[in-house]
Amino acid sequence: MSNPETETRDLLILGGGLVGMTLALAAAKKGLSSHVVDRADPAELTREGFDDRATAISTASWHLFRNIGIAEGLEQFACNISSIAVTDQNKPGRIDFQPEPHEGTLGRMFPNRRLRLALFEAAAEEPLIHWVSKAEIAERQRSEFGVAAVLADGRKLKGRLMVAAEGRGSPTREEAGITIAKWDYKHRAIIAGLTHSKPHDNVAWEIFYPAGPFALLPMNDDADGTHRSSLVWTVSEDDGNAVMKLGDRAFLAEVQKRMGDVLGEVTSVGARSSWPLGFHHTAKITDERLALVGDAAHGIHPIAGQGLNLGLRDVGALVEVLAEGARIGLDPGDAQLLKRYETWRGLDSFMVALATDGLTRLFGAPGKTASAIRRLGMAAVQRTGPLKHWFMDEARGVSGDLPKLLKA
């Protein structure tokens, strides 16, 4: 049997997180081979308690998971989002996004750890994926003939197309000199698991405050029936450290004050983590034998929970373009294929980024007048069927020119 280390593979994927690994699996389903290089230790990433974060997976992303064969194993960990309630500081005049019964859910919540485990287990069994973890990259090479990554231990992995899936601070993007537009929101997202006395009834709450959104996302009950939700609370950079330092009781009191009675009494809080919020968008998402996917290409405010789903749309589009190219004998690094990917994804991701940035600014405007205007706008959306449907289609990720892998 040939040694995968020495094989020139179709893709050289730098970054084996949720987006990078989904890409490797989706590519393998189309017969495309890959090297996946990641600096992290998978055992560390999947250990109990490492990451309390949870992610909303849109309907379109769920189709992708089904199409690459990991949905079945994940199903038991899903908590459906059957509706979304949006309020301005819990004042009267809220919007309820509730799809018709035949339209299915607005998404599914998963613990990040479960998503990683499902992807890592599938990747370990896929011969078309050569996965190198705990690896530092010493040098990246791209030429008209191919790409390579030289690892710190001297190994050299070769491919035909390099894909940067390393997240926001992508060194591959920086090295390629791809410029990014970015601004810092001067905010942090504080994330924690909560237990509470009332069931959430599969409703996700988005409560807007001038300092930023306060979101409560439904999670599955514990085995003993304890009700759970995931909190994503946006605070200003200045308040972030203070909120992180609060004792559990003081933190719970602050949380309870902001959420009112929507989930009854908050009974406990899990480990807290805090993440800086910013917006960035690249001027282009391709270069010679290089494609950017996920946060390496676009980082948006988590207000609509669309970050990962946007990255998975990149995955679906890139794989579709490469698979169609392979059918007519084109190399994965072919410039016209990359141009197709760029055109397809560039506009969609920019529109989502602009929309979420606009929402952040709209809901962040302080003062009574701004709040009154927001509630007026929300009341209008509540009454306008087509507009609500548009928002729900956006949440489900089913609008626009969808890649085939993201369709049922």
Image (tube, grey):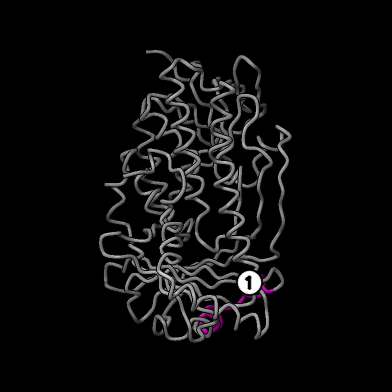
Q: Can residue 157 be seen?
A: no
Give above or below for 395 relative to 343: below
Q: Residue at x 73, y 40 (%)?
A: 179
Whether 252 is among the magenta residues is: yes
Q: Position of residue 52 (x, y in %)?
A: 47, 61
Labels in figure, total: 1
Q: Position of residue 125 (x, y in %)?
A: 34, 32
User: What is the secondary structure assignment of the residue under circle 1?
Assistant: strand
Give above or below for 150 relative to 112: above
Q: Is 74 situated left or right of 397 in this image?
A: left
| Crowd class of label 1 (few under 14; some 14 to 19; many from 20; radius 10 Å) | many
Which secondary structure dominates the residues rendered in magenta?
helix
362 or 235, nearer to the observer = 362
384 or 28, nearer to the observer = 384
Q: Is 194 situated left or right of 142 in this image?
A: left
Question: Can you say which quadrant of the picture contains the C terminus?
Answer: top left
Q: What residue is disc 1 on?
A: 235
Q: Is 58 situated left or right of 238 in this image?
A: left
Q: Can residue 95 be seen?
A: yes
Q: Position of residue 130 (x, y in %)?
A: 45, 27
Under mark 1, the amino acid is Val
What segment is highlighted magenta in the picture? 239-255
Question: Can you say which quadrant of the picture contains the N terminus?
Answer: top left
Q: Residue at x 50, y 16 (%)?
A: 6
Q: Residue at x 44, y 59 (%)?
A: 395
Q: Position of residue 263 (x, y in %)?
A: 39, 80
Whether 242 is among the magenta residues is: yes
Q: Quadrant of residue 238?
A: bottom right
